[in-house]
Image: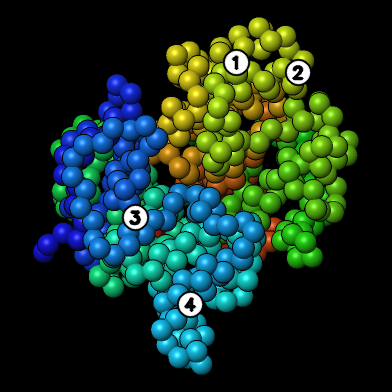
Amino acid sequence: MSAVAEIRDLRVEIGARAIVDGVHLRVLPGQVTALVGASGSGKTTTGLALLGEYPAGARVSGCVRVPDGLVGYVPQHPGSVLNPARRAGALLWDIARAQVRTLPRSERRAAARERIVRALSLAQLLEGEELLRRYPHQLSGGQQQRVVLAQALLLGARVVVADEPTTGQDALTKRRIVDQLAEVARQGIAVVLLSHDLDVVRALADEVLVMRGGHVVESGPAERLWTAPRHPWTHELLAAETRFPEPMGDVQATAVLQVRDLTARHGRTVVLRTGALTLGAGECLAVVGRSGGGKTTLARCLAGLHRDHEGELLLDGVPLPRSLRARNRGQLAAVQYVFQDARAAFDEHRPVLDQVARTALRLRGTAPNQARTEALDLLTTLGLTEELVRRRPGRLSGGELQRAALARALLARPRVLICDEITSALDTVTRRALLDLLAAVRRDRPDLALVLITHDLDIAALATRIAVVNAGELVEQGPAREVLTTPRHPFTASLTATSVRLAAETRT
């Protein structure tokens, strides 16, 4: 079978460093080719080469051959390519109208709508036209992703590059994405999958390339690679997948943060109701549920980032202002938030060390020199060298930036630390290291209350308690072991069953 796209001997240099070196890739129609590896290994640079996109100032050599038709791209953070001022369906209508403009005027609207419906169906965007009337910020990450994929399919893409498509997705949505990409491949479209999620790669990939340090260290049919890996790095990736820290244990503690009858809105639409929720000192609460179900809205309410809500938030029994801007310095320091997209949380023009040190300056009134010393000590403890953190964010990998974001939050000496999907974009080895790091932080700070927003039920199992959110409602909460093994609510049961089934299917 002839390749629909091909890369030969690709080398991409920035300064004196090659971020991709000697990469070969053949993409076949109707097949899924997966690139796996750690953050910074060169996966995204290789995938973007198919679109003719390279980092600013890069020197490029080698050969990249792509089809005459469009190469579609679904980025890891699809909201970044959607116009926030236009409704989600606006660009789809623009594309479809351009395609039918040669038809008689009376037939154009129906023909355009038919094309859009076909693209939506192929992208598994089953919510249909009602969803397309929303603005991007009113969509979940999974919904944004499917809108972007529908745009590429409507344009007639023969190759689709999917960059971490399951990042930050729950088990049910992940299952849907697997089905969605499999259906795209069945239409004869080539899929290039860039992913840290080895379960999803197992379920989809025909061919796998393992990357490290800009090189392909191993490649071959997926079935062979899983059963008989040859390179030590492949062995390490697979081994780290199954090793997790010990569960965090039961904690009986005084309440630090209390939520009472919280009702959050987007405009007039109610997006979250929680009833009562309590977080104790030393406790780890995992919040799980579907993408778009209200987990991040809950976290943002706690942090003062979503102020359109009613009900009470109490910190040590004292009401906590709804808006971040109304909180005093002590309250800002007490509740800290680590975002899923660590790169977007940093100013690209300033060294990472300066940005981390600013937390101690602003929230604790620490002198500048002392703040930098504290920041550097903490960053070093988290495994980041002084040379590395004196760089700007663009020169750090996603995993490195996630550690820096964690250091910035910890430097405030918070009572409550909210971690929003901070492991979802990491490879198995880096994810394991970050989980070990969180466990060490909890040992050093036994009074710290930790909130883990996660779609990964293996990670949720490490918590002391789990809260399950679905369709804007807190449907179940309790000890982690109890919620996962004997769920009381039908949604929790479907969530745990889908997670187990996907894992079992990808290993058979």
Residue appearing at x 40%, y 64% in the figure: 152
Report the residue marked by disc 2. 364
Please tell me the numbered disc located at residue 272: none
In-image side of 244 versus 109 (left or right): left
| Distance CA(mark 4)–CA(mark 2) | 56 Å
| Placement of the C terminus among the 4 image quadrants | bottom left
| Distance CA(mark 4)–CA(mark 3) | 25 Å
Q: Which label sits in the foreground, 2 or 3? A: 3
Report the residue marked by disc 1. 375
Report the residue marked by disc 3. 161
Is there a contact, CB below 8 Å, between mark 4 and mark 3? no
Residue appearing at x 67%, y 20% in the figure: 358
| Distance CA(mark 3)–CA(mark 1) | 38 Å
Residue 229 location, quadrant = top left
Residue appearing at x 70%, y 50% in the figure: 298
Q: Amino acid at mark 1?
A: Ala
In-image side of 435 versus 187 (left or right): right
Is there a contact, CB below 8 Å, between mark 4 and mark 2? no
User: x%, y% of residue 301?
Assistant: 74, 46
Q: As displayed, is residue 84 above or below residue 312?
A: below
| Distance CA(mark 2)–CA(mark 3) | 45 Å
Q: Amino acid at mark 2?
A: Arg
Residue 27 location, quadrant = bottom left
Please tell me the numbered disc located at residue 97: 4
In-image side of 298 versus 503 (left or right): right
Q: Residues within 10 Å of mark 4 (few under 14, many from 20)?
A: some
User: Residue extending furthest left?
Assistant: 1
Give SS at disc 3: strand
Res. 266 visible in picture: yes
